[in-house]
Image: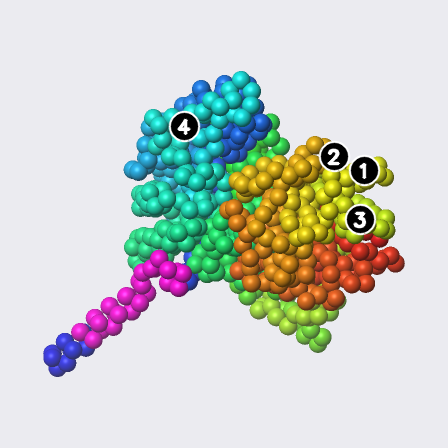
Amino acid sequence: MIKKNNYLALLLFLLVGFFCDVNAQKFEPTVASMQQYQTPEWFKEAKFGIWTCWNAYTVPAVGDWYARRMYEEGHPHYNYHLKNYGHPSEFGYKDIVHLWKGEKFNAQELVDLFVETGAKYIVGMANHHDNFDLWDSKHHEWNSVNYGPKRDIMKEMQDAVKKYEDQGIRWGITSHLERTWSWFQTNKGADKSGPYAGVPYDGNDPNYQDFYLPPDPNGDAKPTQPTNAPLRWREEWLARCKDLIENYDPDMFYVDGGVPFPGDDKGKTGLEMISYLYNQSMERHNGKNEAVMCIKDWTKRMPNGEWGYYWDDIATLDLERTRLPKIRKESWQTDTSIGPWTYVKGANYRSATEIIHELIDIVSKNGNMLLNVSPKADGTLDDNAYKLLKEIGAWMKVNSESIYGTQHWEIPGNTTQRIVKKGNNNLYLSVLEALEDNTIVVPYLAPKKGTSLGITSISVLGSEDKLTWESTNKGLFIKIPDNLKFKHAIVFKIEGDSFGDYNEALLAEVNNRSSELKVWWETQRVTKVSKGYKKVAADGKNQTWAINAENHVVLLKDGKELPVGNLKARDIGASPSGVICVTTTGEVYINKHWKIWWIELLKSEKTSYTSPDGSSWVKIPGIKAKRCDLGRSGGVWVITEDNKVAYYATNKWNVLEKEAEDIGCGWPMQIAIIANGQLEKFEGTKWENLGGNNLKSIDISVRNDVLVTLDKEGKIAVHDGLGWHAIKNEESFLDVSCGLKNDDETIALIK
């Protein structure tokens, strides 16, 4: 019997060991291994985090990216620096760092305020692209303990968050270092004109190379991730990230883009860092990964990894200052801000209402919101930021149960409402606009014929007033008392017994986008170009460009044609970043309105083509195309002569295995095509077919990302990513383009 018990004990030991090993299986730095990642439950339940982007940029306090732009001759940041500090050959960014003291920074006071505001995770920015670490870095001398504030900012914030561990508040870190190698290379330049022409900026001083970096051997100074970062830099980046992860134990980590690095690395170093994060978390949490890794799917901008790589399921999707139009099954996050990313003197902040509405919308689509609030150089918030957080916090104190721990419902809601569920017995309905009368109508919340939703009670969060309501097969009708005040949003708690048997037809009607898109179209400023023109393009400078009957590129102004020399083209596109065309022989030319780095690096012969304002057109060699467009951020996309989709980046054309007839670009990274007469939208790793029939032309609205199409009969139809609306027009149009006029969206059409 004793021997038998020994055998049983041994068997039990082996089984326990086996299952522990399975549960604690380590992540390998491969895509396949890391696709076992699942977003931790704490993050799914938290929904709302607050983040501080704080560094030496707050000393001049004129805007984000100061460390780069102060070295770009003519840029407003360069001009400000010249006027207030001197020439960057004599007073550089290192000297700005010395001016940054953070003398009033109190991490505990900030964290207390963020928790009071309703944040369930607090995030600190450990470094930006400026190569300055805000912790006691073991691998980089230029850090906040040695220079500037001379304090371990990350440690102070981490310790402040620990005070709230028993309340489930989590700690996170963002690192923006992956772009630094190329982004910070502007400090290696010199003025091209003026009294300091040819005088090297201080970034050329070898005594400060640890901070300013060695020069890139290929002159790579793009704001994206470096084209081919040297091994030395990749190893340093990894060591600094591991230092953060090991010694500051974040439950959330984030890089400002996709998985680093493009080029020879092909994302291997980034995968190693992420696997290290997950494995460290498992060691600290009994074999369970509690760490959230957030990455951006910027393959939509450049599919070959120029902004970093993206693979489904290895991490949690992060979107910057944008959100999804519909429910996503997997968790995701929007990172956004109350205003500029770093403190700017006199900046306007968003309203509490706008931020609360964004949070409600994101949560209804299964997402989280990470809200940035940047302190001043001294470490304190300005009065307006403080009051804004207090106002958000007051709303959250009453309504947070409709945010935390909720799940998406069947649909997000309709135009003025959002709805989520909690468990099987509670729904939360958020009403986003003040009521014209005392009745709330929820047309999509109705039972199937002959059934009941099982609603037992409805109340308003924060109010003890009794409500009367009626659930019918035409929807839910809620009467509210006259004294109920509307501020930001009213939330109704709908309780019941295992909701179900919804009228699916009424749910489907919510997805009918026709009425909303009709209103959107009616608000557009439409410019109709007379017959005789072949192509039209509206830019962001109140200008309309066209290709006339003789194939000349012209600017249409005051009823006149202003030609671009003898430039002849078969297609033309435009955006706020410039104008692009494909010549009658298939060559691509661009006239940029601002600096576009992948064009600045272009080694192209000078052309004789100039716009009416005197600006020159540059040839982008290496391809033959027939269609083209230009994104708002300067992305150049074309359809080649053999019908392939292609884009320009890192001094070369990148041709995709995708065929199309026309292409349109939006902001910040929307690409859509007409393929086989149907509309398709680029989703980074795949193309999503949105339907349509016999389509021929496409462009994307500048502000709202509405896809505007023409079919072969010249009829207009629009799509917002959720549904279609056909525009009723008696006229037939030849071409369409979207732009801005006096900062308002405009549509240009050729009759």
The residues colored magenta run: 10-34
Q: Give the CA distance from mark 4 to mark 1.
A: 46 Å
Query: Would residue 26 appear left or right of 344 to someone viewing this image?
Result: left
Mark on residue 612? 2
Compare residues 522 and 680 and report the one nearer the observer: 680
Above or below, 500 relative to 177:
below
N-terminal of the pair, mark 1 or mark 2, is 1
Question: In 3D space, how far apart are the residues under numbered discs 2 and 3 (Cα atoms)?
Answer: 18 Å
Image height of 687 relative to 541, above or below: below
Q: Residues within 10 Å of mark 3 (few under 14, many from 20)?
A: few
Q: Which coloring applies here? A: rainbow
The mark lying in front, picked from 2 and 3, is 3
Task: Confirm whether residue 205 shows in the render.
Answer: yes
Q: Position of residue 315 (x, y in %)?
A: 44, 56
Identify the residue shown where x is 55% and y is 52%: 653
Sequence order check: which comes first, mark 2 or mark 4?
Answer: 4
What amino acid type is highlighted by mark number 2? Pro
- State the separation of the CA atoms marked 1 and 2: 10 Å
Residue flagged by tag 1: what amino acid is it? Lys
Is disc 1 in contact with disc 2, using a CB cutoff of under 8 Å? yes
The residue that disc 4 covers is: 204
Tell me if residue 471 can be seen.
no
Q: CA distance from mark 2 to mark 4?
A: 38 Å
Q: Which residue is mark 1?
A: 557
To which residue does mark 3 refer?
550
